[in-house]
Amino acid sequence: MSISVRDQFGKHLAQLAQDDSKVLALDGDLGNSTRLDSIEKETVDSFLQMGIAEQNMVGVAAGLASIGSQPWVCSFATFLTKRALDQIVVSVAQTKFDVKLVGSYSGLLTSNTGKTHHSLDDIAIMTTIPNMTVIAPGDAGETVAAMNAMHKTGGPMYLRLTRDETIPLFLPDAEFEIGKGKTLTEGTDVLIVTTGSTTYRVAEAIKQLVDMSIAHQHFPTLKPFDKELLLEGARKVQLVVTVEEHYIRGGLGSIVSEILSEELPKRVYRIGVPDRFFGCGTDEELLEASGLSVEKIKKSIGALSSKYF
């Protein structure tokens, strides 16, 4: 059974706010979509409606953090990371304030809203900011575990969440440590590296690829990156493949390529969103068009079998 990441996010942030009065939720007038309305309904004193004013919202969050609160700022990922980038860098990252930035509706799956709402460059933007931790959990259970770790750890953090409603609790455990990845399967031919919601679709594709010995690593923390785990897996295989719901430049594939080029030169094949804008469409249509449906991922990885092995 699928469990909504955004529903779990809203419920758990409400619980954190109930348990800790320092936790505050700042909403960019999208609470019914991001599920911040859970906090508004259950712990109204912890909820601040900031309107469609992302720059001001981040500035207010920095002010609240300066007096000891832990603000969680939530908006659609594309609005938060681009409209408020200056405030994120100057008011949050440079000061190292304990502000948690939540980019909901990341990637392509934004409910038929089109290219204005697609967030396909936020990993590139946020991982280049000093002092910023970047997290992209793979399912609802890991989202809750990541939020607990974020709550306990001070400093600026960005949480990348999906709107995808089809992901079940598939990860083997709910343990989460900031900066650590997870090996989901072992293999000797290919290492597939994933993050966020893409991990589930890749896991489903791997089940159908029986002609290759495939290792699969999931990295819910993109910064700091678990370099040691990546190198451990890459040493055992001939080819590394990255898959992400993000532009092919600047995201997970770039991070992996940079590490391997310096530490362990290895052929890397990147699967991601091509360098163009996408229009409106259902989740299935957009995943198919971008090459990120389970079937398209399976075909892309399967084609490597005849090319490299």
Image: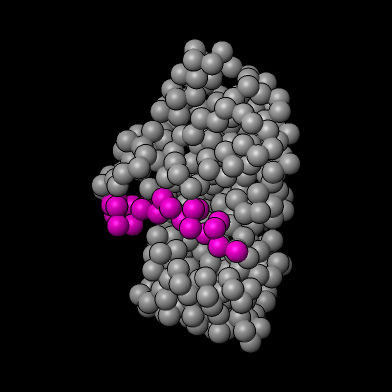
Q: Which of 39 and 283 is in front in this view?
A: 283
Look at 64% across and 57% down and name the residue there. 146
Q: Is residue 51 inside the magenta stretch?
A: no
29 lies left or right of 166: left
Q: In which quarter of the image is residue 156?
A: bottom right
Q: Quadrant of residue 53?
A: bottom left
Residue 61 x/y as whole percent: 53, 79
Look at 49% across and 34% down and name the residue there. 270
View extreme (left): residue = 279
Q: Give the range drawn in magenta.
A: 109-130
In this rendering, the answer to whether 100 lies above or below 110 is below
Report if residue 207 is visible in the image.
Answer: yes
Q: Is the magenta stretch mostly helix, strand or loop?
A: loop
Residue 138 x/y as whole percent: 57, 46
In this rendering, the answer to whether 246 lies above or below 60 is above
Look at 44% across and 63% down and name the residue there. 81
Residue 304 x/y as whole percent: 50, 19
